[in-house]
Amino acid sequence: MNHEPDSIPDEKALILLLAGFLGSGKTTLLKRILSWETDLSDSVVLVNEFGDIGIDGALLKDSGSDVIELTSGCICCTLSADLQRSLKDIWNRFRPKRIFIESSGVADPAAIVTALREPLLMRSMRLSKVITVLDADFWEAREVFGPLFYSQLEMADLILLNKIDTQEKEKIPQYLKEMHEVLPDTQVVPTIRCNIDPDTLWTDADVQKRFERKPTHVFKEILLEGEVPHGSDGPHGHHEDDRNDEHTGNFVTFSFQDRGEMDESCFKQFVAALPWELFRMKGPVRFKENTMLINFVGGRSEWVPWEGDEETRLAFIGWDVDAAATLKKLKECLIDL
């Protein structure tokens, strides 16, 4: 028998909802998350795949996470009440810090988000992020899909454009540009086998904005009509340039380090002009008045005060990015003292 929580907990469980069509890579993403070194012993996985668990039992055992299955229906419709009951039961039994919900490939995230607004649930847990895994092939053939496809994208805080290794290289920047133009508030990260770094996943989205967002289907109309809306090496330190890049397929990683001060206005213009295929930049940046930690993911950036060493130390990840050109632009923001 389930018991309702007696009081509001000091710390609510965080819910991460994984959405996406069948075969897009949701299970691959979940397996990858559970293989990270992060301690997930206080996590629970809730799976809804119409009787197909879609989870490697050995991997789950190794992770120390508990697995709950909801089968023979979809949690966004026929099993919505079961989802709410299961989440309450999970809270009473495990008091987890995180709950991963792997939804069915035919589930509408909008309906699941509505179910998560049930008052008793909101006393003990909160939605941290909606992550939609999108097979790159599906974006190419988006005209043939219905409202569910668009809702899965519109409701996402983070979209993983997955399986990009199956596409022609020159198509990826085109896809990223198109997606950012029709989904300007959504982070989009291209991936192969859902390979992302933990920081990208754990960062919270705007919860209130998530609850208030509703699919407009303007996105669908835009796509179907084919109309897209317009929305110096200094003396200060050591620079790591593209000669030290690490390449995996067409992914490029490179870094920049310098103890000199950056012009803040110039740096903000540099960030605003980054190409869509440069989807990750993180590290402290030293300005004249302070040093800030910059976390840039999929077209959006977050700035927080940095208490460590006063230097600029940035790491970049991109898809077929011209590292040398990017670093050249960045170096132009150094103040020549």
Image (cartoon, grey):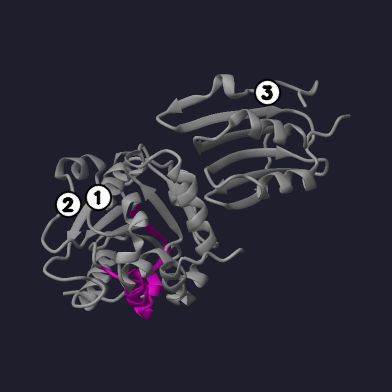
Please give the name of the residue rendered at 56% of the width and 35% of the height, measured from the top-left corner. 316
How would you rate the neighbour count of disc 3 (Cα within 10 Å): few for under 14, some for 14-19, many for 20 or more?
A: some
Magenta residues? 107-134
- In the image, is 95 to the left or to the right of 154? left
Labels 1 and 2: the sequence-earlier one: 1
- Asked if the residue at tag 3 contacts the one at tag 2, i.e. Cβ–Cβ closer than 8 Å, the answer is no
Labels 2 and 3: the sequence-earlier one: 2
- In the image, is 7 to the left or to the right of 50? right
Q: Which amino acid is tagged 1? A: Thr
145, above or below 302, in the image: below
Labels 3 and 1: the sequence-earlier one: 1
**Residue tagged 2:** 54
Q: Judging from the image, what secondary structure is the residue with disc 2 in?
A: loop
Q: CA gap, disc 2 to disc 3?
A: 45 Å
Q: CA gap, disc 3 to disc 1?
A: 39 Å
Q: Where does the image place residue 215, in percent across and percent down from the top left?
A: 42, 75
Q: Nearer the viewer, residue 97 or 102?
A: 102
Say whether residue 109 is magenta: yes
- Asked if the residue at tag 2 contacts the one at tag 1, i.e. Cβ–Cβ closer than 8 Å, the answer is yes
**Residue tagged 3:** 239
Q: Quadrant of residue 132?
A: bottom left
Q: Which amino acid is tagged 3? A: His
Q: Where does the image place residue 309, in percent across and percent down from the top left?
A: 70, 32
Q: Which mark is residue 27?
A: 1
Q: Which mark is residue 139?
A: none
